Amino acid sequence: MSSTVILGIESSCDDTSAAVIVDGILKSNVIASQAVHEEYGGVVPELASRAHQQNIVPVVDAAIKRAGITRMDISAVAFTRGPGLIGSLLVGTSFAKGLSLGLRIPMVDVNHLHGHVLSHFVREQENDPVPEFPFLCLLISGGNSQIIMVKSPGDMEILGRTIDDAAGEAFDKCAKVMGLPYPGGPHIDRLAAEGDPKRFHFAKPHIPGLDYSFSGLKTSFLYTLRDGLKSNPNFIEENKADLAASLQQTIIDILLEKLRKAVEQTGVRTVAIGGGVSANSGVRKAVADYCGANGLKAFIPARKFTTDNAAMIAMAGYFKYQAGEFCRYDEVPFARTTI
Ligand code: KG4
């Protein structure tokens, strides 16, 4: 029997990535991160599209070579169709269409959010553990904070979502007012390791159900800085570790409160986390501790699979390929969509 070889392409934001999965096992995952945005304090969409155009051919080429395959071995090309920056998505989508036509292979469109959830099925070794369905996935990134009930690779239900900022935005925006570089999440994580998480108290939301809100925390953080700076111009510098630790702890408390509620309401015994914020040391530990204390199975992704990568897109594509769900050539990318 011949192998199923999926080439995955991810270009939704500021990482150009390509990966190869052979019979469900990851063979290569190449990521070119775009440094061009650092000096602007955020992703500049037009610059992102141009960088994708420059990166996509060498990145795909490297992924094919590292996997030890040739173009002729590829069974299907899977690509991120959305959500994301439309110009960036167009680069990956157009490339996938060209490759599909040129090689006469099917193409599979992937919802980026499905990719994050299904990243838990990316195996580097045959016996790497994967979650059983159903499981709950806390998807936390720069654009999303959601609790998802995952019933199968193609059947996911959002139980709760943020009504304003995402957890990653809370990290990034608070880091920005502290004068930290973009993206601020990893800097807060690093500083928090040295600080006192109980030193400062920031507002927590009181909203019903399983939805999240982070905008009140952001305002409360800003007021703490403003008040501190009134009496001490060096307030941020002298307290940066405690500010970071207290901010991180508040975000963890907010995330865990609703996650706990979701577990109680659904009775589901397996919990996974995904998205850029799932790289945060405090979040990883809090989820692992909570699951450990309650006899739940926890799936905490390796850090390289938390941020945008094509391995998860190839994985989601592999599931759709097996189900015979292909994409037509007249389909276009979508900037906004949900699960
Ligand atoms: O999933 P992702 O790479 O991109 C999308 O939003 O699609 O997530 C990026 C977010 C940024 O807000 C970034 O600050 C955050 O993930 N992030 C972190 C950490 N690493 C990345 N936040 C907290 N701690 C980290 N270690």
Image (cartoon, grey):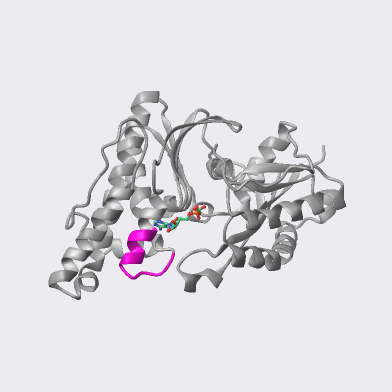
The picture places residue 15, in percent across and down from the top left corner, at 59, 60
| Residue located at (70% from left, 62% from top) | 56
Picture quarter with the N terminus: top right
Q: Is residue 86 left or right of residue 108?
A: left
Within the magenta stretch, is there residue 177?
yes
- From which residue to which does the magenta span run? 172-182
| Residue located at (78% from left, 55% from top) | 69
**Looking at the picture, does residue 231 appear above or below residue 275?**
below
Q: Is residue 255 left or right of residue 134?
A: left
Q: Foreground: 310 or 184?
A: 184
Within the magenta stretch, is there residue 164?
no
**Looking at the picture, does residue 170 appear above or below residue 36?**
above
| Residue 68 visible in the picture | yes
Quadrant holding ligand 1? bottom left
Q: Is residue 272 left or right of residue 90?
A: left
| Residue located at (39% from left, 49% from top) | 165
The picture places residue 315, in percent across and down from the top left corner, at 64, 43
Picture quarter with the C terminus: top right
| Residue 128 visible in the picture | no
The picture places residue 173, in percent across and down from the top left corner, at 37, 60
Query: Total marks drawn?
Result: 0
| Most distant residue in the left direction | 231
Q: Foreground: 236 or 25?
A: 236
The picture places residue 19, in percent across and down from the top left corner, at 67, 54
| Residue located at (47% from left, 50% from top) | 143
